[in-house]
């Protein structure tokens, strides 16, 4: 109620959720058991960031009324800064489970192990509980497996492999830097043999020489460590600035901490001492006459072989990193160059979620979408405007998959699944998707007309390899009646839907004939504009004119959406390329 509606990540949790995680609200309280019952005590807990943004950090936020998904709720708590579990949540509401016969609900269960209990023990106990539970008739068709996973591994699981790869790359660069320092200090020690021999000949003790050399090595190592720490602060800020938003967990907590400082200083001093002091002391142990007699030979055979080995190791490590970077660059280039099946140039998208309170049934949702399409078509500079329930590069939020029934003797391949997509007439023209056979949807394909569908090229080839798909009938119902059949009126080219870059099998249906409220509840509007025209603000204004209480999400160009989907591999490629360049530079030096 304080500004435009917005979409926030949230979670439904039970009353014990915060106690299990060991976190208490900064202001207010957590939920009580009575608030888990449906339609009672409509309350919410908000994050510290949401509290600062929406309530300006005012303690009077406790007790304030907000509208969440169209329903009023009362704020009863504010969580401390930094708490945003799960998945960057900013708002929490009570979890209400209404379990009816034949229904199931997917929930994630969190538990804190007793002291000295292990994950394996918990997994075995869960297996015993599952084996003893009453079995339903349908349980014979599937088997449930007990799974107990450490929360830390679940949170970091998607990035653990990447972190290991980059930790290895950093270790390679560190080794090369240490080898460089070792080589330079070995040369320095060799050039000082005559000086040390003269000092010994003049009566200097090995202890005095050792103290001087130790002081010099410590100063060199400490200076290098301090410079490295300063560069690390700059480097971390730079890497955080180019890191993909929302892809790396707890990114806001990444910083140069005490352990990093201790590790850096200890390693710097150890490198300076080992490779600076030890060779010099070895020189001090040699008889002065030998050192003075061979003063022209700065580097002996043993040291020469050692230095040659170190240089070879540097080059080998640098080549390993360069090879890895080259492979990642090649993979990323192929990813960017793949044929997506649509033309993203000058296309802007905007997604909406219709609240179940105000748009419960299919009819009002279709009215909303029709009004939005009319407003978008009036935007100056808009060539085409359309809506789709599952847009390419939508982040996997909108996709609905499932099987279907084919009319006639043609069998559906076992386990064959397709994307089920609702769209408006003109979507294919807006996105530059080609109609290969048949026709596009028209405005007359509404609820009063025979039900129709359009299939992608892969579906047509897979189901009717020796016949034309146009005119064939399919149904989304397991046991279709006479009114459940859809006639295929067209075939379009395959489209890449997500970051996997694989072409999806898809069945398209006109939204005006859609009868599934849950599928009509999410829609992405796409507008193809004239050259040099930015329609983002006009699209948001159109949404505000139709219903100001509905927030816009993913308002961006399709090119930006593609970049967002490949942001993680792009970031990884950049990192490994930087490490490889550093390694090569050090090896050359």
Image (cartoon, rainbow, N blue to C red):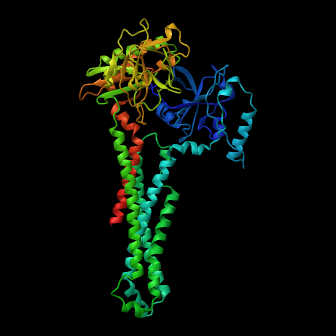
In depth, the one of 472 and 176 nearer the eye is 472
The answer to whether 556 appears left or right of 17 in the picture is left
Q: In terms of depth relative to the viewer, which is nearer, 382 or 269?
A: 382
Image quadrant where one finds the C terminus: bottom left
Whether residue 448 is situated above or below residue 273 in the rendered picture: above
Residue 148 location (% of width, % of height): 65, 41
Question: Left or right of 448: which side holds 533?
Answer: left
* Quadrant of res 272: bottom left
In the depicted structure, whether residue 551 falls above or below residue 266: above
Residue 551 visible (yes or no): no
Classify residue 202 by image quadrant. Answer: bottom left
x%, y% of residue 150?
Answer: 62, 44
| Residue lying farthest to the top in this orientation | 448
Q: Residue furthest left?
A: 531
- Does residue 553 lie above or below 480 as drawn? below
Is residue 496 among the parts visible in the rendering? yes
Q: How many marks?
A: 0
- Residue 199, position as x, y percentages in the image: 41, 90
For the point 67% across and 38% down, which residue is it?
146
Query: Residue at image x 47%, y 70%?
Result: 269
> Given the current orientation, which residue lies at the most extreme right position?
132
Quarter of the rendering containing residue 289: bottom left
Give the percent coordinates (x, y) of residue 540: 36, 24
Q: Nearer the viewer, residue 288 or 125?
A: 125
């Amino acid at each position: 109620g304080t500004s435009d509606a917005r979409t926030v990540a949230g979670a439904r949790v039970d009353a014990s959720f915060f106690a299990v995680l060991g976190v208490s609200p900064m202001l207010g309280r957590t939920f009580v058991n009575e608030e888990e019952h449906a339609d009672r005590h409509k309350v919410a807990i908000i994050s510290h960031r949401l509290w600062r943004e929406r309530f300006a950090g005012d303690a009077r936020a406790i007790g304030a009324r907000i509208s969440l998904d169209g329903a009023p709720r009362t704020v009863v708590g504010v969580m401390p800064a930094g708490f945003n579990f799960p998945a960057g949540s900013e708002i929490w509401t009570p979890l209400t489970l209404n379990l009816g016969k034949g229904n199931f609900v997917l929930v994630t269960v969190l538990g804190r192990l007793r002291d000295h209990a292990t994950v394996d023990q918990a997994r075995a106990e869960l297996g015993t509980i599952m084996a003893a539970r009453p079995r339903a008739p349908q349980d014979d068709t599937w088997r449930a497996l007990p799974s107990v996973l450490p929360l830390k591994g679940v949170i970091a699981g998607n990035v653990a492999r990447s972190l290991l790869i980059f930790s290895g790359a950093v270790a390679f660069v560190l080794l090369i830097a240490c080898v460089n320092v070792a080589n330079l200090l070995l040369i320095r020690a060799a050039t000082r043999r005559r000086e040390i021999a003269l000092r010994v000949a003049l009566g200097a003790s090995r202890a005095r020489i050792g103290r001087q050399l130790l002081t010099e090595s410590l100063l060199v190592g400490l200076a290098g460590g301090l410079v490295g720490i300063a560069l690390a602060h700059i480097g971390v800020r730079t890497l955080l600035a180019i890191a993909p938003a929302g892809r790396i967990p707890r990114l806001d907590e990444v910083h140069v901490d005490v352990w990093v400082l201790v590790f850096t200083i200890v390693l710097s001093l150890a490198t300076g001492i080992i490779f600076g002091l030890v060779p010099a002391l070895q020189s001090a142990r040699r008889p002065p006459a030998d050192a003075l007699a061979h003063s022209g030979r700065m580097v002996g055979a043993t040291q020469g072989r050692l230095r040659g080995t170190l240089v070879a190791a540097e080059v080998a490590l640098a080549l390993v990193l360069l090879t890895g970077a080259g492979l990642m660059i090649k993979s990323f280039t192929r990813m960017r160059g793949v044929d997506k099946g649509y033309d993203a140039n000058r296309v802007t998208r905007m997604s909406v979620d219709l609240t179940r309170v105000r748009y419960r049934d299919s009819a009002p949702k279709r009215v909303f979408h029709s009004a939005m399409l009319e407003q978008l078509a009036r935007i100056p500079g808009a060539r085409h405007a359309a809506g789709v329930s599952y847009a390419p590069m939508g982040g996997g939020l909108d996709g609905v998959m499932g099987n279907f029934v084919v009319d006639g003797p043609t069998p559906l391949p076992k386990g064959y699944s397709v994307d089920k997509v609702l769209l408006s007439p003109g979507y294919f023209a807006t996105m530059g998707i080609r109609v290969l056979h048949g026709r596009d949807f028209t405005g007359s394909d509404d609820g009063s007309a025979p039900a129709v569908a359009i299939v992608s090229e892969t579906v047509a080839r897979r189901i009717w390899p020796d016949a034309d798909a146009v005119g064939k009938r399919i149904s989304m119902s397991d046991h279709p009646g006479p009114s459940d059949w859809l006639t295929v009126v067209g075939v379009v080219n395959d489209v890449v839907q997500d970051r996997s870059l694989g072409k999806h099998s898809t069945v398209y249906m006109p939204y005006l004939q859609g009868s599934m409220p849950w599928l009509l509840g999410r829609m992405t509007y796409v507008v193809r504009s004239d050259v040099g025209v930015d329609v983002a603000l006009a699209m948001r204004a159109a949404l505000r004119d139709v219903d100001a209480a509905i927030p816009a999400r993913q308002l961006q160009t399709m090119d930006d959406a593609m970049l967002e989907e490949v942001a993680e591999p792009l970031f990884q490629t950049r990192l490994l390329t930087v490490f490889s360049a550093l390694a090569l530079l050090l090896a050359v030096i």
